Image (cartoon, rainbow, N blue to C red):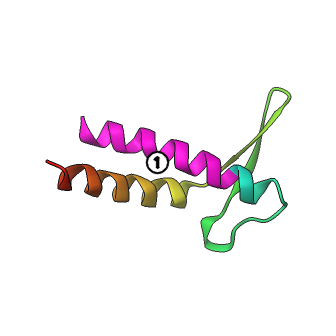
Amino acid sequence: MGLLKAMTIAAVVTGCVAIVIGSQGSSGGQLMIRSFEVADYRLFWSWPLFLAGSGLSWGLILLQR
């Protein structure tokens, strides 16, 4: 259950950071922010940022036990 919570937190953080950096036309270097077209919307996402955020969030959740 802790991993699911961590992935939710990481998805929100990744979305926020990717929108800010990606909307300015940058790929964020090592973050590898990608733009996706879904219907008429443009979405930004970064798998490395999501995985790092999941690990960090999961570690923090485990420390709170």
Image spot of residue 9 (x, y percent): 44, 43
Image spot of residue 49 (x, y percent): 53, 59
Q: Magenta stretch: dominant SS?
A: helix
Horizontal side, residue 8 vs residue 34: left or right: left
Image spot of residue 56 (x, y percent): 36, 59
Task: Decide whether residue 2 is among the magenta residues.
Answer: yes
Horizontal side, residue 32 vs residue 3: left or right: right
Q: Amino acid at mark 1?
A: Ala
Secondary structure category for the residue under label 1:
helix
Give the magenta range: 1-18
Q: Residue drawn 13% across and 47% down? A: 65
61 or 28, which is in the foreground?
61
Quadrant where the image shows the N terminus? top left
In this view, the residue farthest toward the left is: 65
Q: Is residue 16 above or below residue 25?
A: above
Image spot of residue 59 (x, y percent): 27, 57
Q: Residue drawn 63% across and 48% down? A: 16
Q: Is residue 38 above or below residue 3?
A: above
Q: Residue drawn 34% across and 38% down? A: 5
Name the image quarter holding residue 30: bottom right
Name the image quarter holding residue 43: top right
The residue wearing badge 1 is 10
Circle 1: is it few (<14), some (14-19), or many (20+) Cα within 10 Å? many
Q: Is residue 44 above or below residue 51?
A: above
